[in-house]
Image (cartoon, rainbow, N blue to C red):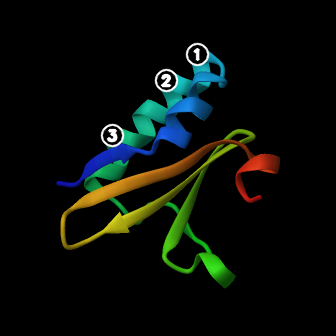
Amino acid sequence: MFKVKLTAKAKKELKQISRQHQLALGQIFDELKDYPRLGKPLGRGLKDRFSYRISVYRIIYKVNEKDKIIYVLTAGHRGKVYK
């Protein structure tokens, strides 16, 4: 089982999301612990990263297979997370 760790940026962004979506994202974090490659693999300059969609929100995360850690890099509205 993997551990999920949020970056300081992701924690800050999650505080700006509605409580309803925060709860949904929390459930996704629990699923990622068992299935770390559940999200969509990103391309171009983000090859080692994945994206997961909840409504209009996205989380971008990176999987460290060696240490069994998922790093949530950013979480927010889909128009902002890819910038």
Asked if disc 1 and disc 2 are in contact, CB closer than 8 Å, the reply is yes
Task: Answer left or right for 66 relative to 78.
Answer: left
Sort mark 1 into few (<14), some (14-19) or many (20+) by Cα contacts within 10 Å: few
Image x and y of residue 75, in percent: 60, 43
Image x and y of residue 37, in percent: 40, 66
**In what element is the residue under mark 2?**
helix
Q: How far apart are marks 1 and 2 (CA)?
A: 6 Å
The residue that appears at 36% across and 51% down in the rendered structure is 32
**In what element is the residue under mark 1?**
helix
Label ID, residue 23: 2
Image x and y of residue 28, in percent: 44, 41
Task: Answer left or right for 55 relative to 52.
Answer: right
Residue where numbered disc 1 is placed:
19
The residue that appears at 82% across and 49% down in the rendered structure is 79
The residue that appears at 26% across and 53% down in the rendered structure is 34
Extreme-top residue of the structure:
19
Quadrant in which residue 38 is drawn:
bottom left
Residue where numbered disc 3 is placed:
30
Sort mark 3 into few (<14), some (14-19) or many (20+) by Cα contacts within 10 Å: some
Quadrant that contains the N terminus: bottom left
The foreground one among 76 and 57 is: 76
Q: Distance between the residues labelled 3 and 1?
A: 17 Å
| Type of amino acid at the residue the image marks with label 3 | Asp
Image x and y of residue 9, in percent: 55, 41
Q: How far apart are marks 2 and 3 (CA)?
A: 11 Å
Mark nearer the N terminus (2 vs 3)? 2
Q: In this view, does 65 lie above or below 16?
A: below
| Type of amino acid at the residue the image marks with label 2 | Leu
| Type of amino acid at the residue the image marks with label 1 | Arg
Task: Answer left or right for 44 relative to 14.
Answer: right
Extreme-right residue of the structure:
79
